[in-house]
Image (spheres, grey):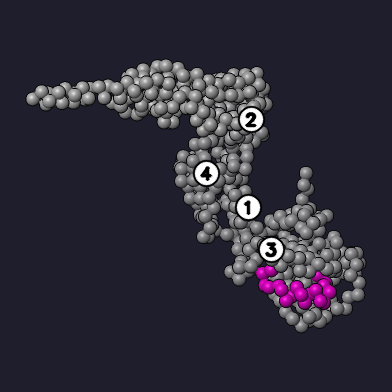
Amino acid sequence: MKNAFRILIILIMLTIIVPGLSYIGLAYYYRDTYSYGTVINGIYATGKTPEEVNGELVKGEDYSTLYIGLEDKIYDVKSDTIGYSIDYLEPLKLYKQMQNPYLWIENVLDGMKNRDVRPKVTYDEDALRKVMDDISPQRLGEPFVCEIEYSEDGYILNDNKSRQYDYDKCVSMVKDALGRGQLYVILDDTCLKDISYTEEEQRSRQMYGLIEGYHGTAVTIKLEGTDIKLNNAELDSLLCRDEDGMPMLSDSGDLVITKESVADGLKNVVAPYNTYNNHFFKTHDGRTVHLTKGTLGNSVNTSVIVDEVYDALIAGDRNITASLEYSRKMNEKEQESAGKIGDTYIEIDIDAQRMYFYKDGKLLVKINVVTGTHSKGQDTPEGVYYIYNMKRNTYLVGENYRCFVYCWMAIYRGVGIHDATWRKLWEDDTYLLNGSHGCINTPLDEARTIYDNAYVGLPVIVYSYANSAVSEN
């Protein structure tokens, strides 16, 4: 009985003393290290000294570069430039002092919790301000304006006045980020200055509000299978504009639209489809000629839909559709090849008496030719034509001539491109006194090359810079 009691006393003492000693031992262990369940800035710190945790925190981040974002640009600044350094040791020690090593059991009961510790940051503020001077946030966007402008996208509001940055706010935001040990900072709208607009600028903003509403209008012109949808610039061309090109406002403050302004705007909209006797052509040497005669192209008369579009706009319709038809249209066979000037065409420069044949964008023939006799008023007519007839081994017959040609390519009435084996002179000035009756005389070999690669519908452009050149000021 005595032995049993003695054993019981020993077991009770072991149950109390061993855990107690273990508890005291762990408390002693946590005397210089962080207690159980300690996580600092995402690092498991249990059993580690502040120095060890500091080493891991500093080593785990890249502090070599400071990144400053402003608008759509990121500026990278080497940390050494501003004497930047970072150290967590002081706040880590402070946190360690706050831990009672004998209360480590509380962490066991509460579980692991992450604690964020802010580092001690040092840097040269004067050097930082010099960096900010180089970025120049206070001058971003100069000159500061708020005005309506006309662009290829129609009327736009050029307002960068509201994007003025307050220099001191920018510096303060960067300093706050550095103080948190953060080396990536975006200078956002909280750094903008508080801006007030002048009365004129307020009027511009109000007018642009009207324009934005107007831009919500959808106008579609249906042209024989083609839908022409007006973009903002084309919509704006329907508005009445003052001498400065700005939209006009009525006495009631609405945008002004008249039948005349709609007619002018629609005429420009369909101009790419109104190609009959209206061609702008860039020649072999990069100059531009405007040719208002010929046979190639189609015509569209927009006057038939002006009232329809105007009435719909005045009524405030948001979805407008109008149908158009060609007033002159090339036949189906001609339309396949000759609806417009593409990469394959013949170019005839009357001034230089030169002919160029481009096939798929590549120069195939370049040769001297002889056009209509200038002194007799038999000049080859300028314009944009197309080959409408082709024959081999035929006779050309006129009032006082009958001649055999191997290759005949008609472009306009009795005018065409053909070989002229009887001709001996091919000088630049031959046409002045000894030219053709209006045709384009061509050396035989080149005429055959052109004929072999030509087709009915092939565009032929005939011009004189003296008569048709477009001034490019």
Q: Callout 1: 10 Å neighbours few (<14), some, many (20+)?
A: some
The answer for how far apart the CA atoms under marks 1 and 3 are is 20 Å
Q: Which residue is mark 1?
A: 271
Confirm or deny contact between disc 1 and disc 3 (CB under 8 A): no
Confirm whether residue 203 shows in the render.
no
Q: Which mark is residue 343?
A: 3
Q: Which residues are magenta?
A: 440-459
Name the residue located 40 percent from the left edge and 28 percent from the top edge.
46
Q: Amino acid at mark 1?
A: Ala
Q: Single out the mark in the foreground, 1 or 3.
A: 3
Confirm whether residue 284 shows in the render.
yes
Q: Amino acid at mark 4?
A: Tyr
Where residue 146 sits in the image (x, y, percent)?
Answer: 60, 28
Q: Earlier in the sequence, mark 2 or mark 4?
A: 2
Q: Single out the mark in the foreground, 2 or 3.
A: 2
Q: Is residue 207 left or right of residue 112?
A: right
Confirm or deny contact between disc 1 and disc 2 (CB under 8 A): no
Q: Which residue is mark 2?
A: 78
Q: Amino acid at mark 3?
A: Asp
The answer for how far apart the CA atoms under marks 4 and 3 are is 38 Å
